[in-house]
Image (cartoon, rainbow, N blue to C red):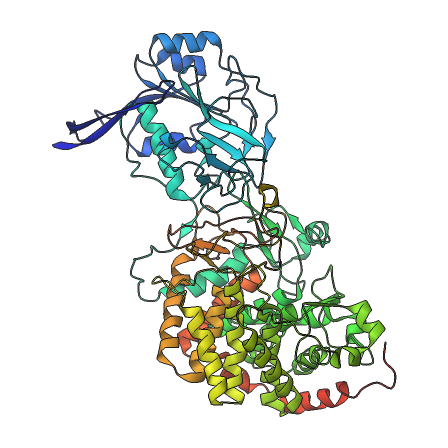
């Protein structure tokens, strides 16, 4: 069969000129006439396997000299370090080898060489982390200054003129927005003596999960086409980690149920539940409150039963072998959130083992950890009822983290149909309420030592304004929830006052942190529950306004796009390249980039929008929930190679590229992090409630909270004779 198409023959040369000959008859490739290349390196190398899948006849040789010596004239030779990231001492390129290749007119790709004529190559590579590949020549088929995620790169730093690709720490999502000024850069790909040289393991693209996928594929299409001497398509490209479904792929029947099943199994495949057999690892890596990170847990590790708690998830660091670090932190919010997801899934899928695990997590949170111990468990103490942020920071109290720990525990209790945590839950809500000021705000963070010194009435009577729904609003939702159970009017009055102030300040005065979209998503829940307890036209208008604002950024795929607010956010602005990775921050660098966040926005939006839909019956809300639910089902991680990732969700997703891609500048919770609590648990619980067309509000009505909570309120809201304790 003859096919007529445009074919480009790429030749080596200092100017890297592509000579394109159009409308030539090209014979369809068969195994008999498949192109042949010579190869030195490991046969498990990603490039070697790709060439085989693409139909190349790859001749493997034991040394670079053997590959060059045996290669036919005018053919292509790939020389790849066989031990990356260790330097392969066999991969030494001599002047005689280069002379022999020149006489035979060979097209050479040489990667990670231990030696090369005219280059001062160090004996050991430089390991990098936040640096990314920056395109410096349009010949690669990519825009200049566009970015490639060459994760955890080991680079041999050399000096080279006119590189096509460099490695540097730069600000940007798709391009180096501030250029390459004032930032160290290392040549990654350049031409020397007619050969293409790479000073890192570019051929580690599949194993190292380089991205974005389309750009990496374009790079390798150029490189292979040039060495092969003919245009290639790369029709058999493989990803080790990818979305479960394509953007336009029709979801099969039962897709959401299967997603829920996979999502719960992810907790166990990740070995996130601490077991006594590896508790020492948790102590070793999790005792550092500043950087509680360590190596991934292997599949040979045992899962705990919940009695020692659950870890936080993965960091955003992707190693050269495609694995990711773990966050060994024990956070209170995560314990409550995961307990809710397990209890909900256990009921939905009929697994009592998950429900038992859920109950043990709650016992760990309230009885077996330092998260609710000491002064926090003393009825006479000003910090009574409050829940510590994490086991390493048990005297720090974020209202947002307390709210999600409590909401998770309430949800778990309701799904388990167990009232035995009612008292501690009421105490937790009221411990937060009595440290809430007259206008209904608490501020971002309180410390135990300060509260013990000042006494809780000091905080209850202070004037403070903090229009930041991320930090404040889900505690407001809890106050409304408890008001519904007790009729205690200050819970409603202070919450309504805070909401009124916050809505009046929208949007320009909101303290938007790393994302204004996050603030909108978080604000919807208290507005929905305010309509539940006080269904006035004004309250309905507030809710509808916020929902419509959020949904004006919803893509046809269902994703809700990130947006930054006006002025400076809460975290450091990226004004220079050295700022990249120095603070918490956004996934985007400017508004309009097609990126969704599952850590702060889409996860909470799914839960909040569903509560709003169930509270109002508004069909437009319900339609938005269905679209968002479908989006999250599609982008759930699918990976047979990395079972600890399979079934999870990363923080970032570029729905334009349909790929896991964004700025990875956030220090701690970057683009490829996972979270057992914030991300996984809220998505899973919401998907279950959407599938059953039930609301959290209605599910939790079954708890007999009223009598217990009214007694807690009576005791805790009586001012002490003297402040302090």
Q: Which residue is drawn at 31% across and 20% down?
A: 11
Q: In which quarter of the view is residue 472 placed? A: bottom right
Residue 445 image offset from top left, x and y in percent? 70, 67
Quadrant hosting residue 108: top left
Q: Which residue lies at the image location 44% right of the left edge and 64% below the top edge?
A: 261
Quadrant position of the C terminus in the picture: bottom right
- The image position of residue 435, as x and y in percent, is 73, 77
Q: Is residue 325 shown above or below 33?
A: below
Residue 58: x percent and y percent? 34, 24
Which of 457/626 is in front?
Answer: 457
Q: Quadrant of residue 706?
A: bottom right
Residue 239 appears in the picture as rendered? no
Quadrant showing the N terminus = top left
Q: Is residue 149 visible?
A: yes
Answer above or below: position of 369 versus 5.
below
* In the displayed structure image, the side of residue 720 where residue 366 appears, left or right: left
Query: Residue visible at 46% across and 84% down?
Result: 540
Given residues 367 and 520, the one toward you in this image is 520
- Name the spot of residue 366 as percent of width and height, x first: 70, 72
Q: In this view, does 331 lie above or below 5?
A: below
Q: Choose between 205 and 654: the one closer to the eye.
A: 654
Residue that lies at the very extreme toward the right in this rendered image: 722
Q: So how many labels did they put on this image? A: 0
Q: In the shown orientation, is residue 10 left or right of residue 640?
A: left
Q: Nearer the viewer, residue 353 or 684?
A: 684
């Amino acid at each position: 069969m003859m096919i007529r198409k445009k074919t480009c023959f790429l030749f080596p040369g200092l100017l890297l000129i592509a000579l394109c000959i159009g409308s030539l008859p090209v014979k369809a490739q068969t195994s008999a006439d498949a192109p042949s290349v010579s190869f030195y390196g490991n046969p498990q190398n990603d490039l070697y396997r790709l060439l085989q899948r693409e139909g190349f006849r790859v001749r493997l040789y034991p040394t670079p000299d053997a590959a060059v010596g045996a290669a036919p004239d005018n053919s292509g030779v790939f020389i790849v370090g066989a031990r990356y990231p260790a330097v392969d001492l066999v991969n030494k390129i001599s002047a005689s080898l280069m002379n022999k290749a020149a006489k035979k007119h060979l097209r050479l790709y040489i990667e990670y060489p231990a030696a090369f004529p005219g280059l001062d190559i160090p004996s050991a590579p430089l390991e990098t982390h936040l640096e990314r590949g920056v395109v410096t020549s349009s010949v690669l088929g990519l825009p200049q200054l566009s970015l490639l995620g060459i994760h955890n790169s080991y680079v041999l730093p050399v000096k080279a003129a006119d590189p096509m690709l460099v490695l540097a720490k730069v600000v940007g999502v798709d391009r180096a927005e501030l250029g390459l000024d004032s930032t160290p850069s290392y040549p990654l790909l350049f031409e020397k003596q007619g050969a293409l040289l790479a000073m890192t393991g570019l051929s580690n693209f599949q194993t190292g999960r380089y991205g974005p996928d389309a750009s990496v594929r374009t790079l390798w299409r150029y490189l292979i086409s040039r060495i092969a001497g003919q245009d290639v398509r790369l029709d058999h490209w493989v990803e080790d980690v990818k979305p479960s479904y394509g953007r336009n792929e029709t979801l099969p029947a039962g897709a959401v149920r299967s997603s829920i099943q996979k999502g719960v199994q992810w907790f166990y495949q990740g070995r996130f539940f601490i077991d006594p057999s590896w508790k020492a690892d948790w102590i070793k890596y999790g005792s550092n409150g500043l950087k509680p990170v360590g190596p991934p847990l292997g599949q040979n590790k045992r899962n705990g039963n919940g009695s020692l708690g659950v870890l936080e998830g993965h960091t955003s660091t992707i190693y050269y072998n495609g694995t990711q670090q773990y966050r060994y932190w024990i956070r209170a919010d995560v314990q409550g959130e995961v307990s809710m997801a397990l209890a909900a899934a256990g009921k939905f899928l009929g697994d009592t083992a998950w429900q038992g695990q859920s109950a043990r997590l709650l016992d760990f949170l309230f009885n077996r950890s330092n998260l609710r111990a000491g002064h926090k468990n003393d009825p006479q103490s000003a910090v009574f009822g409050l829940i510590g942020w994490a086991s390493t920071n048990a005297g720090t109290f974020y209202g947002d983290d307390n709210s999600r720990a409590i909401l998770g525990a309430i949800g778990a209790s309701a799904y388990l149909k167990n009232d035995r945590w009612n008292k501690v839950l009421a105490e937790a809500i009221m411990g937060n309420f009595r440290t809430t000021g007259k206008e209904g705000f608490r501020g971002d963070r309180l410390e135990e030592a300060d509260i013990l010194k000042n006494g809780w009435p000091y905080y209850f009577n202070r004037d403070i304004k903090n229009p930041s729904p991320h930090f404040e609003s889900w505690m407001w939702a809890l106050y409304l929830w408890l008001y519904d159970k007790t009729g205690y009017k200050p819970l409603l009055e202070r919450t309504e006052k805070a909401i009124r102030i916050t809505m009046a300040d929208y949007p320009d005065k909101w303290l938007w942190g790393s994302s204004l979209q996050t603030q909108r998503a978080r604000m919807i829940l208290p507005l929905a529950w305010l309509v539940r307890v006080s269904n006035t036209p004004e309250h309905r208008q507030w809710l509808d306004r916020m929902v419509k604002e959020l949904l004006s950024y919803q893509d046809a795929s269902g994703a809700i796009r990130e947006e930054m607010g006006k002025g400076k956010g809460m975290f450091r602005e990226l004004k220079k390249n050295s700022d990249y990775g120095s603070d918490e921050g956004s996934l985007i660098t400017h508004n309009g980039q097609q990126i969704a966040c599952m850590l702060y926005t889409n996860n909470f939006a799914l839960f909040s929008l569903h509560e709003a839909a169930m509270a109002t019956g508004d069909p437009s809300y319900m339609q938005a929930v269905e679209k968002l639910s479908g989006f999250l089902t599609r982008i759930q991680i699918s990976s047979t190679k990395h079972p600890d990732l399979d079934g999870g969700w990363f923080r970032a997703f570029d729905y334009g590229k349909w790929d896991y891609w964004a700025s990875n500048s956030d220090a701690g919770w970057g683009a490829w992090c996972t979270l057992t609590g914030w991300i996984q648990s809220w998505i899973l619980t919401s998907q279950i409630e959407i599938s059953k067309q039930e609301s959290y509000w209605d599910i939790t009505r079954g708890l007999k909270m009223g009598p217990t909570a009214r007694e807690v309120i009576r005791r805790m809201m009586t001012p002490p004779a003297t402040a302090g304790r």
